[in-house]
């Protein structure tokens, strides 16, 4: 069955504050700007942009915001961001991958190093932990009112590679390149998504034994999540929500 996804770690954060929602909007806007820069403003031909529009809608980003972000990026206005990935370890060897979009590599790198050092971890070289993760398309659907066998049948028919029940939701996995097609096929059948994006899924997990280190790891993840340049954080901490 499907593996452990980011959704398992963030279910308790579903009721975001207005400030947190605004930060999510900003981060998706950065991704859209880079997608338009690399593939143009037409979501028909730019599959990355099409996926991001769906991600924005799943996060309740208003259509006006989406259209404005695409228009601005298409006109070449705004900041020129670059993608950069950091890899390292949290307390007790937890593997952490940070995906960022920045207009100042030195500033972002300095902040990442400071966070990891201060809270019991350390940044590593490219590839030091990414081999423990696999990139996958992940679609999250609420279980309520849905039949498990029917969801599995529809998901597999749409091209999904796996499906699992995770608490109150179904977690549907796809190959990264198939995410958009599977999402669109299921949407055509009436499915709505709490989340639909590419994620880095861990193949192995780590637990933290010390309460002190649990507190440090939580603070590290909190700071990373709040950082303006950080787009996504992936980790293999097994007992985060305990």
Image (spheres, grey):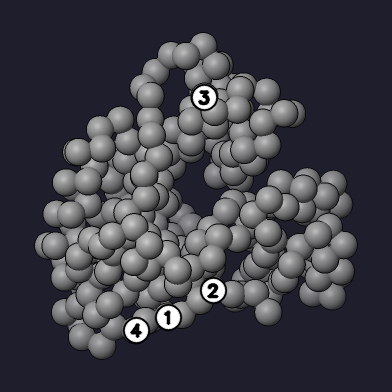
Q: Which residue is mark 1?
A: 205
Comparing marks 1 and 2, which lies closer to the viewer? 1
Dot 1 surroundings within 10 Å: few (below 14), some, or many (20 or more)? some
Query: How would you rate the neighbour count of disc 3 (Cα within 10 Å): few for under 14, some for 14-19, many for 20 or more?
Result: some
Q: Residue at x 60, y 27 (%)?
A: 39
Residue at numbered disc 3: 37
| Picture quadrant where residue 220 is located | bottom left
Residue at (37%, 75%) from the top-left corner?
237
Q: Secondary structure at mark 3?
A: helix
* Mark 2 vs mark 4, CA separation in Å: 14 Å
Q: Which residue is identified by label 4?
A: 207
Contact between marks 1 and 3 (CB within 8 A): the answer is: no
Q: As drawn, is 123 to the left or to the right of 159?
A: left
Q: Nearer the viewer, residue 26 or 181?
A: 181
User: Residue 67 location, x and y as percent?
Assistant: 59, 22
> Could you tell me if the residues under marks 1 and 2 are in contact, i.e. CB atoms within 8 Å?
yes
The vertical placement of 35 against 128, above or below, is above
Residue that extends furthest to the bottom in the rendered view of this protein: 209
Residue at image mark 2: 4
Residue 30 vertical placement versus 98 (above, below): above
Number of marks in the rendered image:
4
Foreground residue among 203 and 64:
203
How many neighbours does mark 4 have within 10 angstroms: few (below 14), some (14-19), or many (20 or more)? some
Q: Given contact means CB atoms under 8 Å apart, are the residues at marks 1 and 4 in contact?
A: yes
As measured in the structure, the alpha-carbon distance from the residue carrying label 3 to the one carrying label 4 is 40 Å
Q: Earlier in the sequence, mark 1 or mark 3?
A: 3
Whole-percent x, y for residue 127 in the image: 38, 62
Q: Quadrant of the C terminus?
A: bottom left
Q: Earlier in the sequence, mark 1 or mark 2?
A: 2
Between 119 and 14, the one nearer to me in the picture? 119
């Amino acid at each position: 069955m499907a593996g452990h996804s980011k959704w398992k770690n963030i279910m308790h954060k579903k009721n975001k504050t207005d400030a947190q929602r605004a930060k999510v909007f900003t981060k998706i806007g950065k991704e859209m700007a880079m997608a338009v820069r690399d593939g143009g403003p037409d979501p028909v031909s730019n599959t990355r942009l099409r996926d991001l529009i769906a991600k924005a809608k799943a996060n309740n980003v208003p259509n006006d915001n989406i259209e404005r972000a695409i228009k601005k990026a298409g006109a070449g206005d705004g900041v020129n961001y670059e993608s950069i990935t950091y890899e390292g370890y949290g307390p007790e060897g937890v593997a952490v991958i940070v995906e960022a979009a920045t207009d100042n590599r030195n500033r972002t790198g300095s902040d990442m190093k400071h966070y990891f050092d201060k809270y019991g971890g350390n940044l590593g070289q490219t590839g030091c932990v990414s081999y423990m993760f696999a990139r996958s398309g992940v679609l999250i659907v609420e279980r309520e009112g849905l039949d498990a066998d029917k969801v599995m049948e529809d998901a597999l028919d749409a091209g999904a590679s796996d499906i699992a029940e995770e608490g109150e939701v179904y977690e549907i996995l796809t190959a990264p390149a198939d995410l958009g097609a599977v999402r669109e096929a299921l949407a055509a059948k009436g499915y709505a998504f709490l989340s639909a994006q590419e994620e880095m899924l861990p193949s192995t997990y780590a637990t933290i034994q010390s309460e002190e280190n649990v507190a440090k790891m939580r603070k590290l993840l909190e700071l990373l999540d709040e950082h303006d340049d950080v787009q996504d954080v992936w980790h293999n901490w097994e007992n985060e929500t305990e």
